[in-house]
Image (spheres, helix red, strand yellow):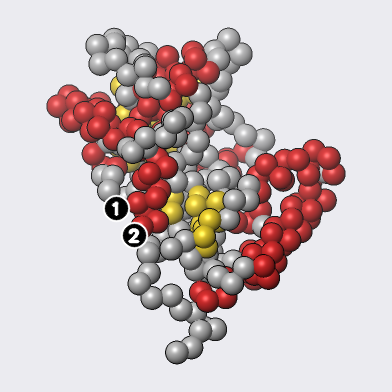
Amino acid sequence: EFFYIPIYGECRLFKEIKENGHKQGFKLTNKWYLDAFNSIVQDYPFWNRTQGRDHVWPFPGARGPHIFADWKKHIRKSIFLTPEGDRSLGEQFNTWKDIIIPGLENDEVFLKGTLRKKDIKRDIFAYFKGTIRNREGKSYSRGIRIKMQENLKNAKDVIFAQPVGGCNHRCYAEEMRRSTFCLCPRGWSPWTLRAYQAMMVGCIPVVLADEIEFPFENTLNWANLTVKIAEADSDKVLQILRAIPQEEIEAKRNYIDQVWRMVSYPKPSRSDDAFHAIMRELGRKRRTMKASTKTTW
């Protein structure tokens, strides 16, 4: 039904930039994509019958298909697998044909779910550790993270800070699991790995990203497992969270307990994980009839 293109451009781009510099690295990566595309079209009979509509391309980085500079000319009708569910990006993400996939967290501290103890003392009300001040100033995160840091600095049960050298990945995971809410404000784009990490340790993600589309919205009710706050209300986060009743908090935790594996990629794979959820999403896009502007009957 579908043809998966096993080409991983981010890995290639990193290699080319390291060896040839930024500008030449992007140019060579584009050529690499073109070579792969030409092979698909010339060596196999399947592309032209749908102009690639049943071909699936992985774009797991924040750049999306733009890592392939000529993508609009050649593969715009294909299905993209991407973590970047930004509804404001009409070109590189189409909610009708593309599939939002969870970002990859492969650290077993998160992946195994061993930190998901319900009886743990949650002495941190809300938690965030990540980039706050970028060299691009308030254009990064639309200034939301800077504003939140200022508004939350006097709350004794809140951590909102830049990462520090003394806290490694294990420490980060431990602090998240001690938290009731894990704050997930947008960065350069809406999606963040932080939301999936939070689910893996039983912390409730608090999303501040207006245009975000979540993975598997056909089957996962994200309203039941997250709190979503408008970017314009980033100065009211604490007020909004403290008003949430305890029974609603428990209900969200219970729902997370049921579905958190849908955002994980364990080895070996299991029927309730992200891979199988992606396969089910592809199944929804199955066409009984395959046609394009180049087919006739």
**Placement of 115 over or under 131, stated as above or below:** above
The reply, left or right, for residue 198 in relation to residue 16 is left
Which secondary structure, mark 1?
A: loop
Q: Are marks 1 and 2 in contact (CB under 8 Å)?
A: yes
Estimate how packed mark 2 is, as few (under 14), some (14 to 19) or many (20 or more) residues with alpha carbons within 10 Å. Answer: few
The reply, left or right, for residue 119 in relation to residue 126 is left
Q: Image quadrant of residue 197? A: top left
Label at residue 218 = 1
**Which comes before the other along the chain, label 1 or label 2?**
1
Q: Residue at image x 51%, y 74%?
A: 50
The reply, left or right, for residue 121 in relation to residue 274 is left
Q: Image quadrant of residue 167? A: top right
Q: Residue at image x 35%, y 48%?
A: 216
Q: Residue furthest front?
A: 44
Residue labelled with disc 2: 284
The total of numbered circles placed on residues is 2
| Residue 127 % position (x, y) | 40, 22
| Residue 296 % position (x, y) | 48, 88
Q: Residue at image x 37%, y 53%?
A: 281
